[in-house]
Image: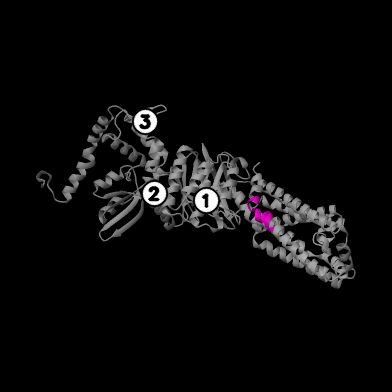
Amino acid sequence: MLDESKPLFIAVAEQIEDGILDGTYPEDTPVPSTNELAAFLRINPATAGKGLNRLADAGVLVKRRGVGMFVTVGAAELLRRRRRDDFARAYIVPLLREAAHLGIDPENSPR
Amino acid sequence: MTAIETRNLTKHFRDVAAIDDVSLSFAEGRVHGLLGRNGAGKTTLMKLLTGQIFATSGEMRVLGQSPLENPQVLAQTCFIQESQKYPDGFRPLDVLRIAEGLYPAWDQELARELIADFRLPEKRAIKKLSRGQLSAVGIILGLASRAPLTFFDEPYLGLDAVARRLFFDHLLADFADHPRTVILSTHHIDEVSNLLEHVVLLDEGRVAISEEAETLQNAAIEVSGRRDEVMAFTAGADVLHLQEIGSLATSTLHAEPGSVERARAAGLQVAPVSLQNYIVHRTTAAAAAPVA
Amino acid sequence: MRSRNVIDMHLVNRMQAFGWPLIAVAFALAIMLAVGAIVGSRGPEAQAEMYYGLQWNGAIFALLGPLIGYGFTSMGQYFPLALGLGLTRREFATGLSVVFLGNAVIYSVLITVGKTIEKATEGFGLSIRFFDVFYTSTGAPWQTLLQTFLLILTVLFLGAAITAAVLRFGQVFLWVAAAILALIGLGILSGVLLLDGFGRALLDVLTMGWGPWMVAIAVIGAVSAGAWLVLVRRTQVS
């Protein structure tokens, strides 16, 4: 369920981010609480909390006292911009390397 | 706040040091894993910390005080022993009723819920229960006691996958609602690794590791690829394990900042090392290392 | 009071605490009544002879016997559970002492009442002696009450002390204790055989009268209780 190659709290944060990007958590609506997230993902509440706090620090979520964490307005756009920057590093570089292994010339890519 | 603090704690059984100069600290309100092979001293340590046995030397503070013959501390401490003996004729019902009188924070409603979930025959003599049902008695006691400090020694023994999942989910849910200090000793590391915040690994009575679980989860990486490339990459690195097959090799090594990126740049496959595998490597590596 | 839980623990198994001793005593009494009925049918002379002989009747041990095992069970089975549930050794010792006292009171009263009825009804109308025997004192009721109380309490503490010593020192204790007892027995035997006047002196000691005997039992009980209290505070549960 979670990406095992990363620290758990980062995987938690990224999963929430995915939810924001695909509209599961619309802006200005609450995300699951620490305990709900912990029970659902079967992880320690402290780890779940750390993931949520990471998003709060990044301005993606906002704490509302006594109610919980909400998706900030503009969060999806913020995430999209950041992920676009990561896209090349995460996908294009490995793609080019694999292409080189296979002897595929990027300039002359097959159909 | 620390829930448990030991200094140079040592326990000898005749001339064998079951616990050897152990200085540890367990923070309050977290889930700690107490790991190690059979005979590493996990149960002995827990018995010392709950005053079941006496230390040969050293000091310990449990919830700020010595646990020895200390009702204030022991009423806040619940120790679920894998080898707990029950008197003849006792039924789960009887044990739980007595425990209810001993633990101030006992939750009878939770106990009833757990009995139903684990399908524990509460009126059957404990001597006639299966190993898994016996484990369930301990689990129910340990969770329902809501003790600020709870030790689970091999709570999984004899439990099937469904019951193990039940224990995990109940522990997690109850821990979230009623935070407390939990010391969990188990060989099923993979099943609990996402629950642990701090891990202590004992090896032959000594502390091999006392570290944040998150750190350990990323402490090592597994790189694989062509043998010469792997060898070139791992030269000078702290290698935990090396496996070769033909011209290919897989190496488990301690990760340093940037090693994942460097390995990828060197054209190697990089995979994370689970806590369980890391612990296995650390234990066997220690066993294989020459005696200093 | 957490020690209360030790008492609760001992009351879990009501059959073991009260059921079996009472069933055993009822069964033994029933047999004695049957014997009494049979002998009674042979005439008053046989009955008088039986009445005399029955002062050594050991059927009452059907009741005292299970109590001997009680001390063993308490230390061997209840102590590890008490410790496992977070009771201190001191709390356990306090609770168990109350349990022992309660047992001694309940059963000594039971025997005394039985004896009073037995004497008042002349052996339940059958000239038998079950409660009014040597081991429970053939004297006045208060003597029976005191003697059985002391006897039961001593036996309970002795059993607990022995079990605590085994837990503390292992099997070695049993071997050493058996060896010492054998040596004492051998010493007495050789004294009787080899030394003039030793046998007579021994007989004098054994027939020293009811009072001194009560003191002797009380001393054994007190020593056992003391040894147990010291040992239990140092006992570990493996």
Amino acid identity at mark 1:
Val
Q: In the rendered image, which residue does mark 1 sit on?
A: B137
Vertical comparison of C19 with A60: above or below: below
- The amino acid type found where label 2 is placed reads Leu
The residues bearing labels 1 and 3 have C-alpha atoms spaced at a distance of 38 Å
Q: Which residue is mark 2?
A: B275
Number of the front mark, 1 or 3 = 1
* Secondary element at image label 2: helix
Residue nearest the viewer, comparing A107 with B46: B46
* Residue C133 seen in this snapshot: no
Disc 2 crowd rating (10 Å Cα; few below 14, some 14-19, many 20+) is: many
Residue extent of the magenta highlight: C10-20
Identity, as a three-letter code, of the amino acid under mark 3: Met
Circles 2 and 1 on the same chain: yes
Secondary structure, magenta segment, majority class:
helix
Depth-wise, is mark 3 or mark 2 nearer the camera?
3
Q: For residue B211, what is the image quadrant? A: top left
Q: Chain of mark 2?
A: B
| Relative to C152, B217 lies left or right | left
Res. A69 mark: 3
Contact check, label 2 and label 1, Cβ < 8 Å: no
Q: Chain of mark 3?
A: A
